[in-house]
Amino acid sequence: MPHVPEFLWYLPNFVETGHRGDTASAEEGYGTLDYQVGLAEAVENAGWAGALLGTSWGRPDTFTVATALAARTTTFEPLVAIRPGYWRPANFATSAATLDQLSRGRVRVNIVSGQDDLAAYGDREDSRAARYARTKEFMRLVRRLWTEENVTFDGDHFQVADSTITPRPYATDGRPHPRLYFGGASPEAEAVAATEADVQLFWGEPLDGIAERIERLRGLQESLGRDLEPLEFGLRITTLIRDTREEAWRDAEEKVRRMADNVGDREFRRTARAAVGQSRLLDLADRGDVLDDCLYTAPGRYGGGGAGTTWLVGSADDVAAALARYQELGVSHFVLSDTPYRTEVARVGEALIPRLRETSRAALTASNGVRRA
């Protein structure tokens, strides 16, 4: 049965200006609490459920920012990116449950296991297998601490004895605790997602790549003995929308031209340390500048990373149709963005959310009709 789609934006959790071409300036208060609150309020007003707050060392602490934004908004749901090596499971479980209670169930969590400046905060990089084994323990233990009392756990990476957290998360029907989002494309990451995550987040791959990964993850759920509700799927991608298809492509190509100028017309090359998911996106440019109908791969050549590596480009109808095809594959969580963040939050929200909700209603109606028949 199709899931009701959920739509989130992205907030640039940085002190420095200019992230992905954002035009906000220090004179406008960029990086201050009032500026971030203004963005969060714009997210609410445009109909988004909330927004992802990114994390890495050298940026504002995501949990502190999320707490401040939750206190200054009414419906905004922060998707708080956190790292197992930065937090201990019991400390995080307590902090997240506390904020979840105070905000009446508005916390979402994105577990990040990718590379970072680990030594700067006393962590260390072991093998990829060990890193994801630690992530698996972290997610399993946090979930147990949110839902059980007197938890004792003696793992290879974390231990607690007779641990009960207070308060508990703000539980509602169908939501016993904050959802755990997770990303990663390596075999080790996918095994963690298949057994521990609530939502697997993909970056902007073509439809055939997403379909293949969904099929594999569903198979892993069965083969690895998942004991949770079925895994859901999400897409984190840049969406460049204009009134017409021609205007959108003109602006997209101009953005890429400026990116190329900024790096001296040098293409970025893959490195041995590139994450598997990032390497998959960079490889797409070898297949062509435009894949499917409107997936633009050229930004990745000139410094676009993560959700900035590929863009969906076109009119609102073009991009909505592209996202609807991801919905048909089973994607029900969308984390979208474009720059300037403050203006595009309204433009993209007003253009896409009603269209995608209508697509979802039609799919649910068709599904209900098939079941009744």
Image (tube, rainbow, N blue to C red):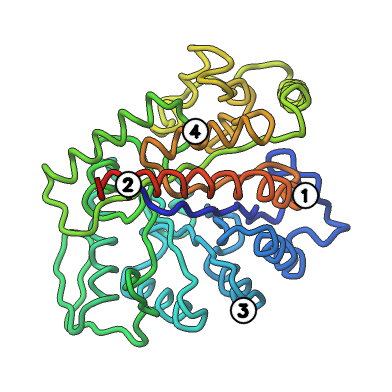
Q: Are marks 1 and 2 in contact (CB under 8 Å)?
A: no
Q: Position of residue 294 (x, y in %)?
A: 58, 24
Figure check: 6 above or below 258: below
Spatial separation of the CA atoms under disc 1 and disc 2: 40 Å
Please state which amino acid type lies under the numbered disc 1: Thr
Q: Compared to 121, does 100 lie above or below?
A: below
Q: Which residue is mark 4?
A: 204
Secondary structure at badge 2 equals helix
4 or 3: tag closer to the N-terminus: 3
Which one is earlier in the sequence, the residue at label 1 or at label 3? Answer: 3
Q: Residues within 10 Å of mark 4 (few under 14, many from 20)?
A: many
Disc 4 secondary structure class: loop
Name the residue rendered at 26%, 50% in the picture.
372
Q: Could you tell whether 180 is left or right of 106 in the image?
A: left
Q: How far separated are the C-alphas under marks 1 and 4?
A: 22 Å
Between discs 1 and 2, the one toward the N terminus = 1
Q: Between 372 and 44, which is closer to the camera in this rendering?
A: 372
Q: Are marks 2 and 3 in contact (CB under 8 Å)?
A: no
Q: Residue at x 63, y 71 (%)?
A: 69
Query: What's the residue type where badge 2 is placed?
Result: Gly
Residue matched to label 3 = 71
In the image, residue 237 lies at what x, y percent? 54, 39
Quadrant in the picture for residue 252: top right
In front of the other: label 1 or label 2?
Answer: 2
Query: Relative to residue 247, is residue 157 drawn left or right?
Result: left
Q: Which circle's residue, 1 or 4, is located before the other in the chain? A: 4
Q: Tell which residue pokes out farthest to the front in this image.
A: 373
Q: Are marks 1 and 3 in contact (CB under 8 Å)?
A: no
| Residue hosting label 1 | 343
Q: Quadrant of the C terminus?
A: top left
Q: Which mark is residue 369?
A: 2
Q: Classify residue 308 by image quadrant.
A: top right
